[in-house]
Image: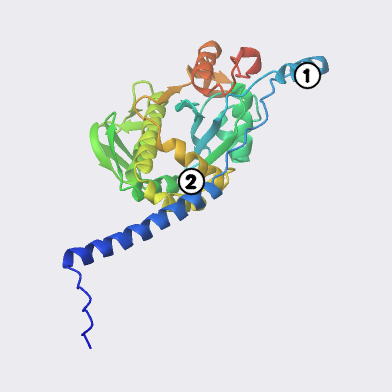
């Protein structure tokens, strides 16, 4: 009987190719499965009810309700309150409003100075945070005349964890910083200029408001006092988000940190929905930042150093960067407290 033909042996290159091909098929299947899971989990966020301007009486309320029915929201444009507390007092140390137009890939990020006057039991907006982020969102909505769709209230430890999760950030510290508070075990010492910051260092730079000189005298770290600090906080937040989005493979770690250290009314599915448009955001042209202008030397209801907003100038910023409507906000829809 003729002998059986021996099966040709694969060359090393052929074996390597088969191994690579099988691995490629498995990886492709895994990517498809993960993408399908993401699509199933991602859920378009909802929009909050319209902000209703203050009414002077029943007739005004009825008229305003009729007018509100004509207001139209821009599609897939969302407003988000970002707030972080002062570790010492529990007041809000950072208050920002973000409007993200996911269709046109535009982000407006506006800081509200923490000493801004409000018509509440407390004269300053930072103290409102003691009643929770929901109350802060309601006060900000009433002040600016826009709905707040969601809030993100961060524990400062969470910010530090997020920065460390992305390997730190490179940041141009804008001013010289030299401040020590032994009671808080807080020691802030930085030269102005570009440097790599860890999570703990980001918190120190974000918190710095005052410096001590060589004689122990305290002075403002920024020429424009706390307004300069809000610009630094905006720049830090932008740098952190940019670095996080450049590492989307760590999305699981980000969600874990958010779950543990951040209080929000976003669902996990809603947060995941933002991942796809955010990955396409051009950080060099798509983000605009401002701080609401005003006078920080005002005395209001017996409290000194309150920040009185300049309504007309603030209104222009609201319409340029924050307005989620197709129509312009008008002053009668806002409620900016005035000392006189």
Where's residue 216, x and y in %? 29, 33
SS at mark 2 in the image: loop
Report the disc number at residue 146. none
Classify residue 50 as left or right of residue 245: right
Res. 207 visible in picture: no
Report the disc number at residue 61. 1
Res. 61 visible in picture: yes
First reached walking from the N terminus: tag 2 or tag 1: 1
The quadrant of the picture occupied by the C terminus is top right
Point 32% across, 62% down: residue: 22
- For the image, the number of numbered tags is 2
Residue 298, compared with residue 236, is above or below; it is above
Q: Nearer the viewer, residue 75 or 317?
A: 75
Q: CA distance from mark 2 to mark 1?
A: 38 Å
Q: Nearer the viewer, residue 156 or 255?
A: 255
Classify residue 219 as left or right of residue 255: left
Point 34% across, 25% down: residue: 222
Where's residue 132, x and y in %? 61, 41
Residue 28, compared with residue 322, is above or below; it is below
Where's residue 70, x and y in %? 70, 18
Q: Nearer the viewer, residue 30 or 323?
A: 30
Where's residue 268, x and y in %? 54, 48
Nearest to viewer (mark 2 / mark 1): 1
Question: Which residue lies most toward the front here?
Answer: 1
Report the disc number at residue 155. 2
Q: Quadrant of residue 232?
A: top left
Residue 205, compared with residue 12, is above or below; it is above
Classify residue 1 as left or right of residue 324: left
Point 55% across, 43% down: residue: 270
């Amino acid at each position: 009987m003729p002998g059986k033909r021996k099966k040709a042996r694969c060359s090393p290159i052929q074996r390597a190719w088969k191994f690579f091909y099988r691995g490629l098929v498995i990886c492709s299947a895994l990517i498809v499965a993960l993408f399908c899971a993401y699509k199933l989990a991602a859920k378009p966020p909802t929009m909050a009810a319209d902000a209703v301007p203050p009414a002077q009486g029943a007739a005004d309320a009825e008229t305003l309700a009729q007018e509100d029915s004509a207001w139209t929201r821009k599609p897939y444009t969302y407003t988000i309150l970002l707030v972080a507390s002062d570790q010492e007092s529990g007041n809000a140390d950072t208050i920002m409003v973000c409007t993200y137009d996911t269709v046109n890939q535009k982000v407006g990020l506006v800081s509200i100075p923490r000493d801004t006057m409000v018509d509440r039991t407390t004269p300053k907006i930072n103290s409102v945070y003691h009643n929770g982020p929901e109350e802060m969102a309601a006060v900000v909505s009433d002040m600016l005349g826009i709905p707040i769709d969601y809030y993100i209230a961060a524990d400062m430890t969470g910010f530090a964890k997020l920065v460390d999760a992305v390997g730190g950030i490179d940041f141009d510290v804008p001013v010289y910083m030299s401040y020590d508070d032994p009671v808080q075990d807080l020691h802030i010492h930085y030269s102005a200029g570009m440097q790599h910051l860890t999570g703990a260092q980001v918190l120190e730079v974000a918190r710095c408001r005052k410096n001590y000189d060589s004689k122990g005298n305290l002075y403002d770290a920024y020429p424009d006092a706390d307004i300069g600090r809000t610009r630094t906080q905006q720049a830090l937040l932008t740098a952190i988000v940019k670095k996080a989005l450049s590492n989307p493979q760590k999305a699981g770690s980000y969600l874990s940190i958010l779950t543990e250290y951040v209080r929000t009314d976003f669902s996990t599915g809603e947060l995941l929905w933002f991942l796809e448009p955010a990955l396409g955001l051009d950080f060099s042209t798509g983000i605009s930042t401002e701080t609401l202008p005003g006078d920080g030397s005002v005395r209001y209801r017996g409290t000194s150093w309150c920040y009185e907003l300049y309504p007309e100038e603030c209104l222009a910023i609201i319409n340029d960067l924050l307005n989620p409507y197709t129509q312009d906000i008008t002053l009668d829809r806002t409620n900016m407290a005035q000392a006189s």
